[in-house]
Amino acid sequence: MSILIDQNSRIIIQGINGRAGSFFAKHIQAYGNNIVGGIAPAYGGGWALDGKVPLFDTVQECVQSTDADTTVIFVPAHSAADACFEALNAGIKNIICISSKVPLKDISLIKSCIKDSDAIFIGPSATGVFSPGKALAGIFPANQAIEGDLGVISRVGSLSFDVLDLLYENNIGVSTAVGLGDNCMTGASFVDILDLFETDAHTDRILILGQPGDIQEELAATHILESITKPVFAYIVGESINPERIIGLTDLSMFDTQHRSIDKIQALANSGVQIAHRIEELPQILKNKAG
Amino acid sequence: MKLHEFQTKAIFRREGIPLPDSILSSSPTQAVQAASEIGYPVILKAQSLVSGRGKAGGIRLSRNDDETEKAASDILNIKLKNISIQHVLVEKAINIEEELFIGVHYKAGTGSPTFILSTEGGISLEDNKPLSPVFSFIHTIDPLLGIHAHIARQGCVKLRIDPKKWKVIEQISIKLWLVFEKYDATLAEINSMVFDKNGHPTVLDGKLIIDNNALFRQREFAGFLDPAITSFAQAEARKFEHKLVRMDGNLAVLSNGQGLASATIDEMSRLGLYPASVLLLDNNATPSSVSAACRLLENDPSVKAVLVNIYCNYSTCLDIVQGIINVQQKYILEKPYFIRLVGSQFDLAYALLTNYANVNISKDLIETVRYAASFFNQ
């Protein structure tokens, strides 16, 4: 089993005609997924991906004729909120927003609208959801991953691809990997996904990948102590970063002076989470607990 | 983007938040002129985005022209975190009866705006210090509903504020919310609001931070000089949607994710290396945008070498390497490149680099960092 998506997921791509959208739609389809439709306003009735995927003007029409349940969004930042609301209103359950640089106001509004529905909002700037051997709804490199019992939740971007490669090289299988995005505000959080893994029969242990900024790691630490029974492992990067050493100002969260990795690691360690201080340590600590 | 006090006040004034008269000046002569128009006593305030202006003598009371000239010239000589003060705001001095803090921001971990009303002094939401639960009212706002009068009133009741002041506090709280909402702020702060003897409110200071990601619809601020950009290089990086942060080490880090860059810095620090700068590429890096990034690093004298760590997903290894080589052909290559790449077309990228003596390429980060360290230890 897996969380959020599996071989029966009916996936659509919003922004399928864009540069990134068309590139990753091919990538997702190549993994053997069922892409049931693409959204491209004014191109409805046409076809994408060599005539294999029907295009629709609106998500509503698409859902009516395809029963789609998962969307992967690649539209420009200024249309991202609209795309998410459109998916939500059409009844899509998994709203996965890959678009980056989305304003905080928009993220906050989407979160407010989604909280009373049974849909989940992942992103923005997400790397998406990937259940190896079953389905891919995101931009994870898919060729190097095997099915297994480890649930992965990530708040880093391309570094999570490195981690998946390393797990593969060490023959460690993954039930589902969820890339929440490295924004300072995200839809679904570590806590939300921890709960999904806790009740997933095929996930036996959980790995979280974090970085400086926000307080998701701290909130996860409290939640793990209170409600998570499965073993949790963590690799939180940026331990050595001293934000005092930057010249000038920045809004990059990796230089956040208030939410530093050293504190996050401390909080997680206090909750009994096994910590890897460098990526190379991951296979070792994961093997320890497995035995 | 953090706005200066005078820019914040211009927005507040436009939206009907009461403020004392003030005039911006950039020389002691202008300050004296401003003070005579406003009328003594006045306060002179350094316009700085770095906190700590009060402690550095950047806020001064003046009762006459001599004091004003002296204060303005002192303030314009202050440097905060190595950034010199360009402007002094000359403002009517107000007799303070009672101070109040009102703020709205996105508090980490909540995903919603948070409204704060407080009678505590010296609050700065940016500093994120815990607020006194006794003197502060903290309320999570549903962004669909915004701030209504009753929310501010609940705060007034909790903080035992004189009921005669409730109406004004409600009105100004709503106005602050409108500013926050309308201008895509991530933080809007009134610090502080005071009442004079007749009960009239005035806002002495304010802070606004505008969401950089919302500049596409906040055109007014798009033309403002972003204070985070202090160098030509940063402005150039922004053109390609790259992010450049300068640091005090000597090895530049070029990467395509904050997590990957952070992991790189961790690995470097184990061998005693620290970044001269961190340059993050846009996801859709092309050879020309990589060239532009490398050119900036080539021209920066504090960069002695460049460490590249990129996981190629959308772009290929070949794209990245072609970008780097383009730079090296146009410029005399003085700086060594230590490159770690993962992704498609690695072998082609590798083959392309065999003729370059100053370039080292690998799939392994630790190996790459070790090479860089041995260069610096030579």
Image (tube, coloured by chain):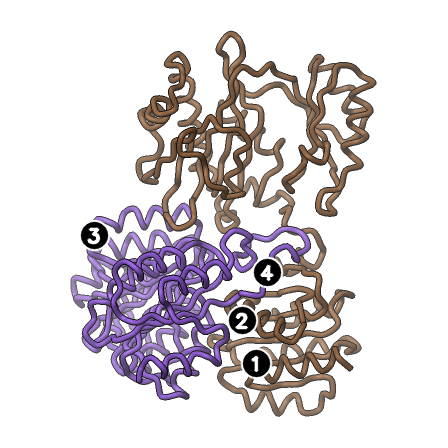
Chain colours: A purple, B brown
The answer to whether the residue labelled 2 contacts the one labelled 4, judged by CB atoms less than 8 Å apart, is no
Circle 3 residue: A117
Name the spot of residue A6 as percent of width and height, x first: 22, 75
Asked if residue A110 shows in the view, the reply is yes
First along the sequence among labels 2 and 4: 4
> What is the x, y in percent for residue A178?
34, 69
- Labels 1 & 2 near each other (Cβ < 8 A): yes
Q: Amino acid at mark 3?
A: Ser
Q: Nearer the viewer, mark 3 or mark 1?
A: 1
Q: For mark 4, what is the residue?
A: B243
Residue drawn 46% across the image and 67% down it: A236
Residues at discs 3 and 1 both on one chain: no
| Residue under numbered circle 2 | B263
Mark 2 or 3: the one toward you: 2
Name the chain letter of the residue that bears numbered label 4. B
The answer to whether B34 appears left or right of B29 in the picture is left
Number of marks in picture: 4
Image quarter in which the C terminus of chain B is found: bottom right
Mark number for residue A58?
none
Figure check: A234 above or below A251: below
The circle on residue B365 is: 1
Label 4 to label 1, Cα distance in Å? 22 Å
Q: Amino acid at mark 1?
A: Leu
Q: Mark 3–mark 1 contact, CB under 8 Å? A: no
Q: Nearer the viewer, residue B289 or B301?
A: B301
